[in-house]
Amino acid sequence: MSTTPEFKQTPSQTVGPYFAYGLSPEQYLYDFKSAFTPVVATDRAEGEHIRLIGQVFDGAGHPVNDALIEIVQADAHGRYVETAEDIERTGFAGAARCGTGTDAENRFVIETVKPGVAVPGDAPRIDVILTMRGLLNHLFTRIYFDDEAAANAADPVLQQVPAERRHTLIARREVSGGRVSYRFDIRMQGDEETVFLDL
């Protein structure tokens, strides 16, 4: 008879407390390196440097303090990162990860550049993965830009979204002190619920 204990799979519902430690440790001051940080683009990266700022709101309209945002995007020329050498050469990582738990307002703040068009006919966009407590699986959405109206009007994915819901995928451009930011809030439920994509 074996004396080895039988370990069962950890239920996915309990993944929440481990976001910070396992996925964004540097942000929470753990003493080991993150695979990804909230910085997509260093000063060396070409393109318009922007800050992506937002909050995740629960069904009651309260900011979520333990959500994890991951993004993937093309660079300013519409190219995706393919190798570590690309990152070293350009200063552009192509992806970022940011938790909402270390900001006083429970925001995610990501330093990047505005993406170019990766596929002809598509609008410039950032792909988003959201993980948070209460979700059995992560969610997917996209960020489009309010100053790209013509491109947005032709984007094949955005045009499949009902017209009255498209605004939930559009980030608002804000300029303060010469710094360009785009505001994008994610709402989990309610009248302004963000459109999530079935991938």
Image (tube, helix red, strand yellow):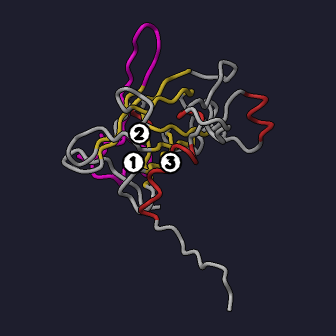
Disc 1: which residue = 158
Give me the disc on residue 19.
3
Residue 38 location, x and y as percent? Answer: 55, 32
Q: Residue at x 77, y 40 (%)?
A: 84
* Closer to the camera in the image, 73 or 129: 129
Q: Mark 2 points at which residue?
A: 152
Camera-near label (3 vs 1) is 3
> Relative to residue 133, is residue 37 drawn left or right?
right
Q: Which residue is drawn at 73% across and 28% down?
A: 90
Query: Magenta part of the protein: which range?
Result: 152-181
Helix, strand or loop for disc 1: helix
Q: Nearer the viewer, residue 172 or 188?
A: 188
Identity of the residue drawn at 56% across and 40% down? 24
Residue type at the position of mark 2:
Asn
Split into 4 quadrants, where in the image is the N terminus? bottom right
Up-down relation of residue 35 to residue 3 (above or below): above
Question: Would residue 25 be found to the left or right of residue 169 on screen?
Answer: right
Q: Does the magenta stretch include residue 171?
A: yes
Q: Which mark is residue 47?
A: none
- Location of residue 119 with respect to 27 vertically, above or below: below
